Amino acid sequence: MEFRLTHNNLNVRDLDKSLAFYREAFNLCPVRFYEPADHAFRIAYLSDGHTPWLLELTYLADHPAAYDLGENEIHLGLSVSDYAAAHALHKSMGCICFENEEMGLYFVEDPDGYWIEVEPA
């Protein structure tokens, strides 16, 4: 029996805003959407175009408040081929929330408060 990672899910308050953020910050693009007939939720699956892993963004129509992320001790991790260019982009976007120069990585915060670790490839 083999298990394979396929995706991570993040619930978001504004799907369009999150789609725009992940496209600008990480070039993650939607590859499929799902919305039931009753429009109770919308799901977008984003891809990096290189790996089979997907980021699932879920918008729940009946959840109007911000999500309580608790201590937010979980995060996504992405590597990047041009670390300096990525850092400059994220700095210009104003989304860097923590840097660890000693470890050679930093974190950005998405519109819902989720953290994404960025490290050199």
Image (spheres, rainbow, N blue to C red):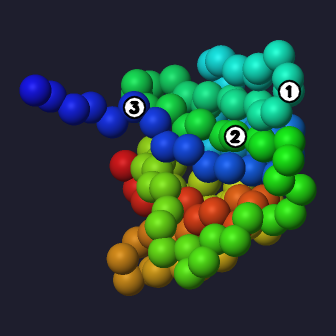
Disc 2 secondary structure class: strand
The x, y position of residue 40, in whole percent, is: 82, 33
In the image, what residue occupies the spot 52% across and 24% down? 49
Disc 1 secondary structure class: loop
Residue beneath label 2, please? Answer: 58
Tell me which label, 2 or 1, sits earlier in the chain: 1
Badge 1: few (under 14), some or many (20 or more) residues near its Cα, within 10 Å?
Answer: few
The x, y position of residue 30, in whole percent, is: 68, 25
Closer to the observer: label 3 or label 2? Answer: 2
In the displayed structure image, the side of residue 42 where residue 30 appears, left or right: left
Residue beneath label 1, please? Answer: 39
**Frontmost residue, 96 versus 53:** 53
The x, y position of residue 38, in whole percent, is: 85, 23
Badge 2: few (under 14), some or many (20 or more) residues near its Cα, within 10 Å?
Answer: many
Tell me which label, 3 or 2, sits earlier in the chain: 3
- Name the quadrant containing residue 77: bottom left
Q: What number is the disc on residue 6?
A: 3
**Frontmost residue, 88 versus 79:** 79
Against 61, is 29 above or below? Answer: above
In the displayed structure image, the side of residue 110 where residue 38 appears, left or right: right
The x, y position of residue 18, in whole percent, is: 78, 46
